[in-house]
Image: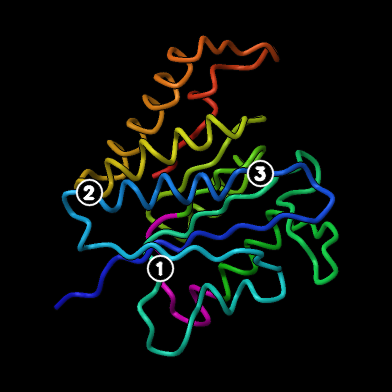
Amino acid sequence: MADKKRILFLCSLPKDANVLRFIDEIGEIEDRLLTGQNRNEFDFLPKLAIKPGNLRQVVTGTPGATPPFIIHFSMHGDKNNGLVFSDTKGGEAFQSAEYFLQLFDTVVNGFDVKVEGLIFNVCHSKVFAEDLKRFVRFSVGVNDFIPDDASIAFSKGFYGSLFDGWDEKKAFAAGQDAIMEWKAANNIEETDGGMPYEKRFQLYN
């Protein structure tokens, strides 16, 4: 029997940061997996409170283990400083795109771990998706700020389609559609002068 496609969901939240609803995001993905036509082809593995010091070990896993099909990041993003992890004391630990370039160079070239996709469902994460595309088949990042509800809607649409057998392009479009449906159902309008929330998600493949 072929190995299942493993989705590694990584989240982190410093103790004094604004609360993120990644538990709700996890719940939506798990619900989509339960009802997906191809649910038996996937494993969904959430990892809470990821810290930079153990990130490489989490990604590479044990020797001989099946590499992740997708690594999904759910956390705060800072426009100037990068992804916001929690350190060992619960404080902020910023990680830049340069750090991730070094990490994935080690993971892919040093440990021969071939990841298919990276999802940065994180504010101001476009540069991460752009830079790290060289290591994977596809990546998704966010240009600008994105509210929790839009992030959750994207994951619901993206993974619902992926678990039904669609490729990443169609799944990405379904994620954007889910954001538009959420906006229409709740009369949401962007008031920050930026582009529509669904257009802030960018696919690189």
Q: Position of residue 12 (x, y in %)?
A: 67, 58
Nearer-N-terminus badge (2/3): 3
Helix or strand or loop: what does disc 2 sit on? loop
Total numbered badges shown on the rendered structure: 3
Q: Position of residue 22 (x, y in %)?
A: 57, 48
59 sits to left or right of 79: left
Helix or strand or loop: what does disc 3 sit on? loop
Give the foreground label among 1 and 3.
3
103 sits to left or right of 6: right
Q: Are marks 2 and 3 in contact (CB under 8 Å)?
A: no
Q: Nearer the viewer, residue 121 or 112?
A: 121
User: In the rendered image of this protein, does residue 145 appear above or below residue 189?
Assistant: below
Q: State how far apart marks 1 and 3 are (Cα).
A: 24 Å
Q: State how far apart marks 1 and 2 are (Cα).
A: 19 Å
Q: Which mark is residue 36?
A: 2
Q: Nearer the viewer, residue 35 or 180?
A: 35
Disc 2 crowd, CA 10 A, few/some/many (<14, 14-19, 20+): some
Please report the bounds of the magenta region as a residue range. Answer: 107-117
The residue beneath circle 1 is 68
